[in-house]
Amino acid sequence: MILTNHSDSQSFIYLSFPLRSMNVVTTLIKSRHSVRKFKPDPVGELVIADALECAARAPTAMNVQPWLFGVIRDKKILAEIAALAEHGKFIADCPLCFAVFGEKKQTYYLEDCCAATENLILALLAHGVSSCWVAGEKKPYAEQVRHLLDVPDSYTLVSLVAAGNPADMTMTQKKEMKHLAFFETFRKE
């Protein structure tokens, strides 16, 4: 079980069982879920800096690191992004949104930036900050968001990550592993 403490705009996770009896990383991954309703509390600067550092340490083909990360807290800009993103209207009400851009000329920018996005999300969760990944790649609003944030034309939007302290903790059910994985070859039974 993971318990969080949100005090002094810092968030920390407290694990309620001994560390030697479980794997912290897999527990964190299994506890991740998308949150679309946030409290207005700001996210601490140290949390933001740590999440960005973790995003920048994602695996990247040939160590190209083709990413550029935007941190948006201005309510007017958040509202403009929300108005553009058909499945991201809740961005208007989050205290913080990260925008992950990839350098278009790099062959594997999409894979690399998706890995960085996942690192960002998990790092936020490690600090007790919830989030929701909103698609950017191939979306009609990708270019509009790039213009809005004044990002150079050599980059394209890969993802948006709305973040903050959760106002709603609804958990959705995941599919059973027997429907998701196979060993050696796939056999329909």
Image (cartoon, rainbow, N blue to C red):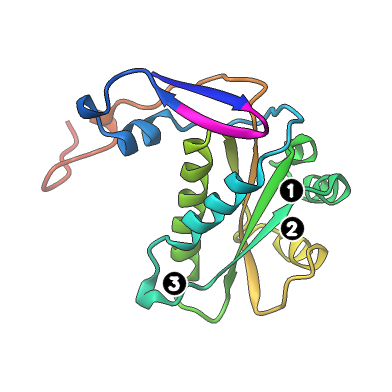
Q: Which residue is located at x 42 percent, y 28 percent? A: 31
Q: Amino acid at mark 1?
A: Ala
The residue nearer to you, when weighing 94 against 20, is 20
Residue 164 against residue 73 in the figure, above or below:
above
3 horizontally vs 69: left or right? left
- List x then y, in percent, for residue 175: 36, 27
* Residue ID for mark 3: 108
- List x then y, in percent, for residue 161: 62, 47
**Residue 162 picture quarter:** top right
Disc 3 vs disc 1: Cβ atoms closer than 8 Å? no
Disc 1 vs disc 2: Cβ atoms closer than 8 Å? yes
Mark 2 element type:
loop
Instruction: Find the magenta span and give its range.
Output: 7-13
39 horizontally vs 126: left or right? right
Q: Would you call the spot at circle 3 few (<14 residues within 10 Å), some (14-19), or many (20 or more)? A: some
Q: Amino acid at mark 2?
A: Tyr
* Residue ID for mark 2: 141
Disc 2 vs disc 3: Cβ atoms closer than 8 Å? no
* Alpha carbon distance from label 3 to label 1: 24 Å
Determine if the magenta segment contains residue 10.
yes
**Residue 75 picture quarter:** top right
Quarter that holds the C terminus:
top left
